[in-house]
Image (cartoon, coloured by chain):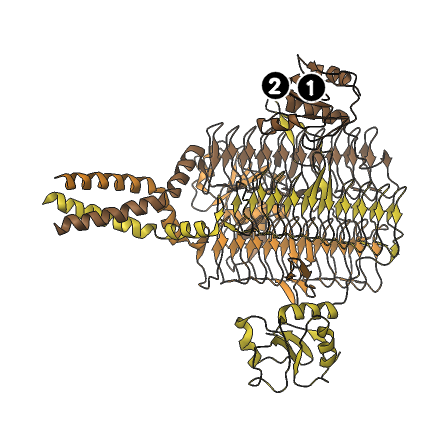
Chain colours: A yellow, B brown, C orange
Amino acid sequence: MTIKDIKNYLGQFFDSVELEGDGECLISAPAKIETAQKGEVSFVANDKYTKYLCTTQASLVIVHHSVSVDEFSHTTSFLKVRDPYTAFVFLLKKFATPRIVASKGVAPTAVIGEGVSMGERVSIGACAVIGDRCSIGNNTVIGPHTVLLHDVIVGDDCVLFPSVTCYDGTIIGKRVIIHSGSVIGADGFGFAPQSDGSYVKIPQMGIVEIGDDVEIGANATIDRATMGSTVIGRGAKIDNLVQIAHNCRIGEDTVIAAQAGISGSVTLGRQCVIGGQAGFAGHLELADRIQVAAQAGISKSFLQPGIALRGYPAQPMRDQLKHEAMLRNLGSMKAKLDHLEKEIEELNAK
Amino acid sequence: MTIKDIKNYLGQFFDSVELEGDGECLISAPAKIETAQKGEVSFVANDKYTKYLCTTQASLVIVHHSVSVDEFSHTTSFLKVRDPYTAFVFLLKKFATPRIVASKGVAPTAVIGEGVSMGERVSIGACAVIGDRCSIGNNTVIGPHTVLLHDVIVGDDCVLFPSVTCYDGTIIGKRVIIHSGSVIGADGFGFAPQSDGSYVKIPQMGIVEIGDDVEIGANATIDRATMGSTVIGRGAKIDNLVQIAHNCRIGEDTVIAAQAGISGSVTLGRQCVIGGQAGFAGHLELADRIQVAAQAGISKSFLQPGIALRGYPAQPMRDQLKHEAMLRNLGSMKAKLDHLEKEIEELNAK
Amino acid sequence: MTIKDIKNYLGQFFDSVELEGDGECLISAPAKIETAQKGEVSFVANDKYTKYLCTTQASLVIVHHSVSVDEFSHTTSFLKVRDPYTAFVFLLKKFATPRIVASKGVAPTAVIGEGVSMGERVSIGACAVIGDRCSIGNNTVIGPHTVLLHDVIVGDDCVLFPSVTCYDGTIIGKRVIIHSGSVIGADGFGFAPQSDGSYVKIPQMGIVEIGDDVEIGANATIDRATMGSTVIGRGAKIDNLVQIAHNCRIGEDTVIAAQAGISGSVTLGRQCVIGGQAGFAGHLELADRIQVAAQAGISKSFLQPGIALRGYPAQPMRDQLKHEAMLRNLGSMKAKLDHLEKEIEELNAK
């Protein structure tokens, strides 16, 4: 691909793509600015990395329109756009060679139940197990060793990586990606305490519904509802080792970072961003576009959209930062207190 | 099932079940009070939900004896019991249709080792791998893709969902449920530091023993003991993504919520309740019936039964709540301090 | 094995091994000092356990040179060494009977792709799936149900337990152990936010590289780099349910305890020790030999080697302990403040 080809490709996404340098140069791969070599393309979207422009060996760097490139190497060309980060993401997509999760068609070692319906160009990997009455959409890839229990519906253009487990009744939309080891639809953690201290299991009769364009990381767990559905909204992104308990509703385009834990019957709004290892008590609600800091502990509902939360128990960012500043100042409070004590002693002595 | 049938069924569990309304009405499914429709049964066990009694479309609602139902819809019947929540749980059990984890018998694609003994009516799912000399009890279901290494004993009436892994020597009691992705008996995290900064692996020669009526969630990990056994007591309930390290002993009927982590050689008493994401330092002990709040960090033993713990480092609930109240009051302490400083200045000036 | 045999065996590792007692006695197994029986060997390396020397039934106990053993049972023999703990670890290794993860050779149910190269004495377990062009080193054991996507390289003498997943391109060194359920090389959690609140997936084109002598616990997740490699250094030990995000570099001989989470592009030095449930913000760096307490939240880089960190946000141990002591003293600060207030009132009244 020449730099001119890249310019044309990016032109699909950006009104203005300016070239400075040699458009005929061949580009074979993307790379990080720190390590890029001749024939490679990189990007700078953050001032922290501007220094690498002086020394990079990259043949092409994507930068913002505002960057003046005259001072830099004459062997490097530049493409200037409004959003070099997103431009580079689109370039990565162009260079990416898709991994083969499973060959087209049904592997001879896959085990297909009765009454399964499959769309066109479906791939089912080695030893995958598809339960009775499952339905698999067009172009969907089911990795080796992935297990669908009975009555699971998977939409078009999905990729389930190896060793995913979907319990019976799970409904998955279109273009959903689920990474290895994730378990969708296991029983919610529901037990009725008895007077002798033991527990009776509460049947978990609901299902999990996953919207279009959701991505779920590795070894995440999303439990089925007691009744009705646990719902993952369209476009939500869920990282590795996240726990989503029964009866939760995760809003559209909400992002949940690794190891966060959402207790039962929590409702998260749309476009929330939940930090890693954050925890939620049960039965609470967050409004749209709320940001939760990593390791925060959310103990009650927050219904004002767009706020940021932090700390344990979590409170709005400004209050929490003020609180943390006060904590950091405890030493000087203590010093002042001791000083006043002495002064009062002196006053008393007079 | 008619409402009368339900009344009779609940009569097995409760001394008194009072019917108000039409006993002949047919009930086809349980539902949440917010969404229940004609022909469905729901319940109200919490005042927060009493308001739905005015508007519910349910044909039957289970309520407490003390609820006066005259004011509510004439199309809804009521059954009054001492404990409507538990009554509804028993009803759920009656309505639940069991998921098919594996068909009866040994799937043709299952791989069975030498010297395996199996009880009656055992189900072994597709591609399950049963190691040499394993023993599987009557009526037990081993899901597709579940792997037992050699010398594993599984009791009667267990369900191991797909893709569970039990390392060699694991002993599992009766009526145990293990959800997908859980790993039982992997090596404890034990390494002897060497003078050059590297580590020598300490062989983990023990096993894991799981008592009767235990339920383990998805993607949990329970490590084998270095010597002897890691023990999960009868009736314990362990949620998704919980870590239980080597040599732990978890008491009977103790409940551990998602993502909690129990370090090596910890002993938890009976009927403890451990909140989500709580963490335990190693080699400590908790007495019976201790409650640990979510995200707490337990750094030492607590030997008084029945107390509640909270915070980091965790302390008894009353102390911790007092501490947290004091923290919330830091601002007013600071204000008072500044005020006193000024007063002293004035006093000094006089 | 006689006690003399054990003395000779330990003589390989220690300059001086002193025997007190009967060297001909037969020893059949190692055991904990609390429960050891006749014919068993145990050890005491910690004063806390010295009391058991009076009552143990063990036929042999390994102790430190400094322990005076005359007062103890005449039926117990003693071997004295410089480091009884390490001596016992070596003894455990001698007694350990290796579990059979997979029989030698390729199981008939394993699925082997095209162009796979295998060393000598390789074991591939039942239903394992080895993708195209993978390379497996000498003596390496691939457990049942483990899946390698295409182009994975596994070195000599490795053990991958059942149900490990390695995505395409993963490179694994020699003598690496990976426990069940771990997922190596899943996509990093990278999404470019769009102006409408949705996200575009950033292709994750890099790989994971795991050095020699690494051990990874059960259900851990290590994500592939966006470009280049996520690197786990030689000798690192990673516990169950640990999350290591894309582009991280974990130093040699660094130890990470269960449920810790390392965000994207973090660099950890050599010989660090990271406590359980600790969390790291992205793009930061830790110097060599830093110790991080359990549940700590690391929010910035720490570049001084060998320090200890604790708390949220984490700070050097001494500062944090001082801070925690001050917090514990808040009550007395408040009391003093109230007292001073009263005194000033009195002074003002005069």
Under circle 1, the secondary element is strand
The one of A346 and C246 positioned closer to us in this rendering: A346
* Residue B79, image x, y percentages: 69, 18
* Residue B313, image x, y percentages: 45, 42
Under circle 2, the secondary element is loop
Name the residue at 50% across, 52% down.
Answer: C297
Q: Is residue A313 left or right of residue C337?
A: right
The residue at which mark 1 appears reads as: B78
Disc 2/disc 1 C-alpha distance (Å): 10 Å
The residue at which mark 2 appears reads as: B67
Give the crowd class for mark 1: few <14, some 14-19, many >=20 residues within 10 Å: many
Residue A166 showing in the rendered view:
yes
Amino acid marked by disc 1: Phe
Residue placed furthest toward the left: A350
- What chain is tagged by disc 1? B
The one of C180 and B53 positioned closer to us in this rendering: B53
Amino acid marked by disc 2: Val
Give the crowd class for mark 2: few <14, some 14-19, many >=20 residues within 10 Å: few
**Residue C236 occupies which quadrant of the picture?**
bottom right
